[in-house]
Amino acid sequence: EVQLVESGGGSVQPGGSLRLSCAASGFTFSTYWMHWVRRSPGEGLVWIFSINGDGKTILHADSVKGRFTVSRDNAKNTLYLQMNSLRAEDTAVYYCVREDCSGGHCKKFDYWGQGTLVTVSS
Amino acid sequence: DIVMTQTPLSSPVTLGQPASISCTSGQSLVHSDGNTYLSWLQQRPGQPPRVLIYSLSNRFSGVPDRFSGSGTGTDFTLKISRVEAEDVGVYYCMQGTHFPYTFGQGTKLEIK
């Protein structure tokens, strides 16, 4: 069974840092693109990062450029999101998402973690 | 960025009746590989989103056949043939053709 379990969320002051983790199981992690998507009350669902299977191709949203980084450890089946210089507008539930690319159809966000809440407030 | 516009934003529906949600993109979502990467997601209260429809009209595994997706390059529709109580939640369209991937604002489906 495919499982994605996020951790590392919490409350932090503006300017602070957090590192989110996403533990994957039930599939060959290293062969899948993975994504981070967040949901905030003001913005709805927003895609922020994509990383390919070997971690060498990374795409990011402009809103997190220079502040957030994504990485993965395929030996540990874990995806990471390092968040620095956090702002109030980064307050959101952060989801780890798997992309399936079978049958000639990519961009299929087929499994989502339960999400981890990040609250940025003074 | 591609703007995805959903209508309506709220949809009260009677159990057993059909429902329809529209989504319009700011530009064509037909990819160079010929696919149209438009998905529909459902988010039930307290749950993460889950994919219902991918690549315009393909129903994801385990999704009831009362859900269907259709559309052209910029105009898309999710239809529920007969709404059931478990369908309550927020529905999002999402485009995966152009980076950055973008989502619609969400449509809240509720029972009258």
Image: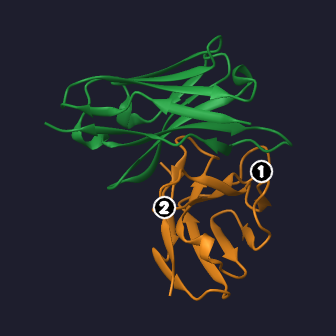
Q: Residue at x 57, y 25 (%)?
A: A23
Residue at horizontal 48%, vertical 61%? B45
Q: Residues within 10 Å of mark 2 (few under 14, many from 20)?
A: few
Task: Identify the image quadrant of the N terminus of chain A.
Answer: top right
The dot on residue B35 is 1
Report, in whole angstroms, how far the alpha carbon at label 1 lies from the one at label 2: 31 Å
Which chain is indicated by disc 1?
Answer: B
Image side of residue A49 versus residue B41, left or right: left
User: Can residue B27 be seen?
Assistant: yes
Give the farthest residue toward the top. A75
Query: Which percent across, then down, holds residue A87?
Result: 24, 35
Residue B55, by quadrant, is: bottom right
Residue B71, picture quadrant: bottom right
In the rendered image, residue A52, in percent from the top left (x then y), is placed at 64, 24
Q: Is residue A91 left or right of residue B80?
A: left
Can you give x and y, in whole percent of width and height, for residue B37 in the image? 69, 51
Give the structural element (helix, strand or loop) at label 2.
loop
- Is A113 on the left or on the right of A106, as rendered? left
Q: Amino acid at mark 1?
A: Asn
Marks 1/2 in contact by CB < 8 Å: the verdict is no
Counting every numbered tag in the picture gives: 2
The mark that comes first in sequence, 1 or 2, is: 1
Identity of the residue drawn at 34% across and 55% down? A41
Tell me the colour chain A is drawn in. Answer: green
Q: Amino acid at mark 2?
A: Pro
The C terminus of chain A sits in image quarter: top left
Q: Position of residue B38 (x, y in %)?
A: 66, 56
- Pointers 1 and 2 within a single chain: yes
Classify residue B77 as left or right of residue A72: right
For label 2, the residue is B45
Q: Colour of chain B?
A: orange
Closest to the observer, A37 or B100: A37
